[in-house]
Image (cartoon, rainbow, N blue to C red):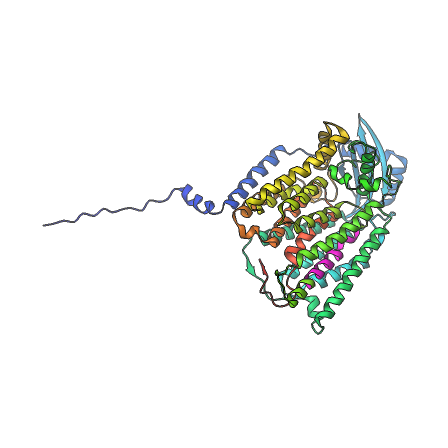
Amino acid sequence: MSSTSATLLTPVRPRLSARVGGPLGNHPALVVAVATLALAWAALLATYQPPHIAVPKAVALQHALADRSTRSMLSTVHWTRLDVTAVDRHYEMLGFYRGPRLVATVDVRGSGGRVLVLDQSNLTHTRYVYGSDIANELQVVLGLCAVFVLMSAVWPLRRIRNLDVAVVASTALSIVLFNHWMLDRMVYVSYAAMAYLAIRCAWRGLGPQREVRRATPIYEQLTRSWSATQQLRLLRLLALSCALIVAMVGLSSPSVIDVGYAVMEGATSIVHGLLPYGHVGDILHGDTYPIASYLLYTPFALFLPVHTVFDDADPSLWVAVCAALLAAWGVARLAASRPRRPVARERRDAELVGLRTAIAWLTFPPLLVTVSTGTTDIVLAALLVGALLLWRKPGAGTAVLSFAAWFKLVPAALFPLWIASLRRAGIGRALLSAVAVSAAMLAALAALGGADALVRMVTAMSFQLTRTAPNTLWTFAGSVPLQQLTEALTLALIAGGAVRLWREPRLANDRVRFAALCAAVLLGVQLAGNYWTFMYLVWVFPFIALSLLAGPSTADTSRWTSGR
């Protein structure tokens, strides 16, 4: 009798760490993003300090009503609600609302136990708009929106791109609502649009690559009976007309805002051998920008120095107009991608796309208003377009991006993505360029202010991290914990996006998806900030245009891919 023995192996359940670690190990970018989100959110909540209010709300109101002229003004506006915004540790603004509308403001200063009423504004009798009155006219804003949609939308209408176009065009509401002092409604509309665009751009940059559904730009659908020459001729004429409108409205604007005066006053200080920080006295916290913001305007201050707000700061308008037109040329080049040896039809298609995108930039509703203020945001947009044009030239592109970060701090958020998108051979040149630009800026600081100049600059710039404003979501909804969550999400997007770009050469070589990721980060910075204005949208729009709005110039979309 024989017997057969068998060994029965019972299945062993894998450990929890193996079950979880397997999927996560295959997605390191997700792991980094989640870890960054958790750590950053916890750290931001733990270190949060509420803004310092120089004068308690009740005390500030008491002193405002004790002032005869202020009390007389407030008795005529019939206010129903009072909000207090801390400008800094000594100044605050009282905002008096009637329903959703801001009807009056009173500025007060508290120091050493004393409270002074500095200024008052009756907004029911005074029309205040950013920049030129022409740029803020409702008919002008609507006309710009119409041309913008004509250049950006596609046929058939049931395409997600048309939803993107509608959301971008809705930024015109920010101008209209601000001009009517409906700040809370402006904030809700604008933040909803920015949140949507941030999600769309993040998905476009990091989501799966899909084929575009066939579509024809509205302009080409409406002119389908025309010859290619006629279509191009009209677009060229329209682009020239839009450029002339931007130039004429910008150069003729009588309303340079405080930022334009601040950089011109700072440039004037440099001309006299002084460090701007501590020497821009005519503008409250006019010295809160990096040194390059003042250096760029120094040549103009040689001929037209600005010492007070009563001087002529028109050079800031000249710079803004030139920057807007240069950016228009840049976005046209970016959008008009073409093969190395294009045939005649491909050259025509590329020019059509480039012209439509340039016109969309020139008719983007906030652009005309922003140009007419003389602010530096237009210059920042042009610098970012220049960096994107030089994206595959690590040395030159990084130099432009570095200068942009020394011009306004925000582009520093793009550096992790920028470096991660470069191949190893180009990282060395990129870092050398960044070091060279930074060394030049530090040398300029030291020459003007000595060894402690950098500390003085950082101290002055810290105001931007502590100030508050009545036109942000966090003023109405409260900061904790949502603002900190938004900040953490932005940091997580930067960290996770950098890992994805580093590990996936195909993604890193796709300029459109890279631009989408940059747009999502820049929008995240705006959403999380303590201060916001619709003028900030101009330095995000070129990235949005390239990633969401630029596309095929005919119904043949075989050369284009998209996450739609």
Against 119, residue 252 (above or below) is below
Magenta stretch, residue numbers: 352-369
Q: Residue furthest bottom?
A: 225
Farthest residue in the top direction? Answer: 112
Relative placement, left or right, of 330 versus 68 is left
Q: Looking at this view, is 444 or 171 the one in front?
A: 444
Q: Residue extending furthest front?
A: 341
337 or 278, nearer to the observer: 337
* Horizontal arrangement in the rendering, residue 97 relative to residue 414 (left or right): right
Q: Tell me where residue 194 appears, x and y as whole percent.
A: 67, 50
* Residue 373 can be seen in this image: no
- Give residue 27's position: percent from left, percent from top: 49, 47
Q: Quadrant of the C terminus?
A: bottom right
The residue that appears at 69% across and 72% down in the rendered structure is: 224
Q: Quadrant of the rendered structure where residue 149 is?
A: bottom right
Residue 132 drawn at (x, y percent): 84, 51
Q: Position of residue 561 (x, y in %)?
A: 58, 60
Horizontal relation, residue 145 to residue 388: left or right: right
Query: Where, by quadrant of the figure, is residue 471 drawn?
Result: top right
Residue 356 visible to the viewer: yes
Q: Residue at x 80, y 33 (%)?
A: 60
Closer to the camera in the image, 378 or 32: 378
Q: Residue at x 52, y 45 (%)?
A: 29
Above or below residue 53? Residue 515 is below
Residue 244 in magenta stretch: no
> What's the magenta bit mostly, secondary-structure-wise?
helix
Q: Is residue 368 magenta?
A: yes
Counting labels gives 0
